[in-house]
Image (cartoon, rainbow, N blue to C red):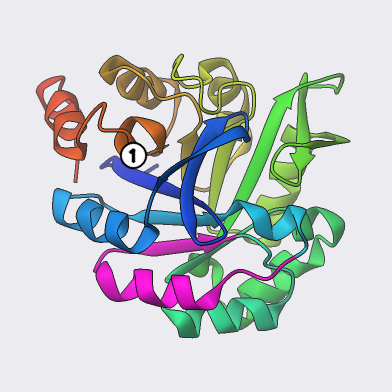
């Protein structure tokens, strides 16, 4: 798909602070989003993802002021998600400084939102965030909503196929089983989903060791998203990139 691999730090934000927990629970404060965005931009991040993880659960709109302040500090593509429910929400976020918009819960509730966004702004701005976990569906991977707290009974493969048909630009595949564990990306999930995804696939959830990034690429990921290993200083972005380059991967 993409000849060069992207490394993308993810800022999970609630009430204006970056947090990180295991499986979206037991959240601990990891820092100020604006300052962290600035540092990651300087360190060589290819993109940045900003997810307001409180927006869907608390039914609150994404805090546009934090997005705007973050966008002023980074000069790399910024993807913003959390509480995006309408074309108007997308318009506001793009005007606040976002380059791409991530949608999740609202698209499951109303799939035509995906085509409405792409028709107005183009597929390149739309990232579908897929929070999946093992469950009793035909592929054994179930779609979840509200930060992974609610099961849907919807098969994750069927959903990404439908979403690709509706015109999304990228799929952000987040393993709710691996999220925050640092036990490695969910390689089985990536391998199972990859043949059904016609867009670039961003793998998320579970990054721990440097080797985890390489294994996810081998499993089919086009980009690698990570949070806690960067936020808590386990690795610098340059370390991950240097490791992957030395292993023969084409890195931006």
The magenta region covers 60-81
As drawn, 15 above or below 10: below
Secondary structure under the numbered disc 1 in the rendered image: helix
Look at 30% across and 21% down and name the residue there. 214
* x and y percentages locating residue 140 in the rendered image: 77, 18
Q: Position of residue 149 (x, y in %)?
A: 77, 37
Establish if 66 lies above or below 167.
Answer: below
Q: Name which quarter of the figure residue 90 lies in.
A: bottom right
Q: Nearer the viewer, residue 205 or 154?
A: 205
Residue lying farthest to the front in this orientation: 29
| Residue in the picture at 78% in, 63% down | 59
Query: Quadrant location of residue 213?
Result: top left
Q: Is the residue 121 above or below the residue 251 in the image?
A: below
- Kindly identify which residue carries mark 1: 231
Q: Nearer the viewer, residue 159 or 92?
A: 92
Residue 61 in magenta stretch: yes
Q: Quadrant of the N terminus?
A: top left
Q: Residue at x 24, y 69 (%)?
A: 75
Where is residue 221 shown, x and y percent of the image?
A: 43, 32
Q: How many marks?
A: 1
Query: Is residue 175 found left or right of 8 in the rendered image?
Result: right
Q: Residues within 10 Å of mark 1 (few under 14, many from 20)?
A: many
Q: Name the residue rendered at 72%, 75% in the picture.
A: 116
| Residue 107 covered by magenta stretch | no
């Amino acid at each position: 798909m993409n000849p060069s691999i992207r490394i993308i730090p993810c800022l999970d934000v609630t009430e204006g602070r970056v947090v990180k927990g295991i499986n979206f629970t037991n959240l601990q404060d990891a820092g100020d989003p604006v300052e962290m965005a600035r540092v990651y931009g300087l360190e060589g991040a290819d993109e940045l993802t900003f997810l307001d993880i409180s927006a869907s659960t608390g039914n609150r709109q994404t805090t546009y002021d934090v997005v705007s302040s973050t966008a002023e500090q980074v000069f790399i593509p910024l993807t913003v998600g959390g509480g995006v429910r309408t074309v108007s929400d997308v318009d506001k976020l793009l005007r606040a400084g976002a380059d791409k918009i991530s949608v999740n819960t609202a698209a499951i509730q109303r799939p035509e939102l995906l085509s409405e966004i792409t028709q107005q702004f183009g597929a390149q701005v739309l990232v579908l965030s897929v929070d999946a976990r093992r469950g009793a569906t035909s592929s054994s991977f179930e779609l979840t909503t509200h930060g992974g707290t609610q099961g849907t009974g919807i098969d994750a493969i069927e959903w990404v196929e439908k979403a690709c048909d509706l015109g999304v630009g990228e799929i952000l595949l987040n393993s709710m089983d691996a999220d925050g564990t640092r036990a490695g990306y969910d390689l089985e999930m990536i391998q199972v989903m990859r043949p059904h995804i016609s867009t670039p696939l961003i793998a998320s959830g579970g990054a721990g060791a440097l080797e985890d990034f390489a294994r996810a690429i081998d499993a089919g990921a086009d980009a690698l998203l990570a949070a806690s290993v960067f936020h808590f200083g386990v690795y610098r972005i340059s370390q991950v990139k240097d490791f992957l380059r030395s292993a023969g991967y084409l890195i931006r």
